[in-house]
Amino acid sequence: MLEVSGLSIAYGRHQAVREVSLAVARAEIVVILGANGGGKTSLLKAIAGLLPAAEGAKLTLDGTDLTKLAAHRIVEAGLALVPEGRGIFGDLSVRENLLLGAYPRRARASEAANLDRILSLFPRLAERMSQAARTMSGGEQQMVAIGRALMSAPDILLLDEPSLGLSPLICGELFGALQHIRAAGIGVLLVEQNARRSLAIADRGYLIEQGRIVGSGSAASLRDDPAVQRAYLGKQ
C-alpha cells in the first residue's frame, strides 16, 4: 500500500499542496478530482520524487520509506508515474520505448512476460513495434507511455490526465485497460479531468481544492453527492 501523510509542496512563497494525506492499496483505483491549478500534478510529481516535499511529509510503499529517495529509487521500490503529456521518446520505436521501462533491476527478470502482458492489454502496439512513437496518434502514444511504466513492474501506478485530448473511443479503451491493470493486482492513483468516466471505474476518490484534500469517499458516494455532481459531473 502507498501511504502519504502530511505532504506539502511550495514554489517559493506559493503553497501548491498543503498537508495532503491519502492511501492507495494494490488492486484498487483511486481518483483525485479537482480544478486546474488545484495541486494535482504537483502532488503526483512529489510522490514520484520529482518535486521536493516540505519537511514533515511521510511517504511509504509497503513499509518502505520513500520520503527522501531519489526518483529512480522510488521506481525500484515499485512506483511508476505516467506524466501529463506522456513524455515518450518520439524518435525511438514503440519497442525501444517499452524496453526502456524495463531498466529497473526489479523488472529485468520479468521483461519478456511483462512485454507480453502489455501487448495483450494494448493489441494495437503489437502491430506497431517498429514504428517511431512520434508518428502515432495521441491515443497510441498514451498506450506507449502506460506500457513503458508497466514495464517497470510497479505495485502502484500514478497517471496524470491520461485521457486529455483523446477521442471518446480511445478514452473508452484507456479506462477499460485501467480496469485490467487493477485486476492484475496493481494499484492506480489517477488524476483525471473526465470525472464521470473515472468515477465509473474507481473504487475511491479524493477531492482537492487549492492544494488541500476537502473530501473523500467511495466512488459511488462521490457520484451521488450533489456538490460533486454540480462541480464535476455537470448536474444541477
Image (spheres, grey):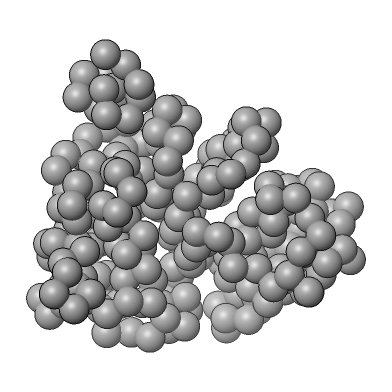
Vertical arrangement, residue 188 with respect to residue 168, above or below: below
Left or right of 32? Residue 56 is: left
| Quadrant where the N terminus is found in the figure | bottom left
Left or right of 138? Residue 70 is: left
Q: In the rendered image, is residue 151 in sight?
A: no
Q: Give residue 129's position: percent from left, percent from top.
A: 85, 62
Q: Give residue 143's position: percent from left, percent from top.
A: 67, 53
Vertical arrangement, residue 65 with respect to residue 233, above or below: below
- Which quadrant of the figure has residue 39? bottom left
Nearest the viewer among 158 and 105 is 158
- Residue at (27% x, 29% y) in the render: 231
| Quadrant where the C terminus is found in the figure | top left
Q: How many marks?
A: 0
- Residue at (41% x, 49% y) in the render: 190
Nearest the viewer among 40 and 66 is 40
Q: In the rendered image, is residue 105 in sight?
A: yes
Q: Give residue 97's position: percent from left, percent from top.
A: 72, 71
- Residue at (36% x, 43% y) in the render: 31
- Which quadrant of the figure has residue 233? top left
Q: Give residue 71's position: percent from left, percent from top.
A: 42, 81
Vertical arrangement, residue 212 with respect to residue 229, above or below: below
- Residue at (37% x, 68% y) in the render: 45
Left or right of 208? Residue 132 is: right
Residue pushed farthest front? 13
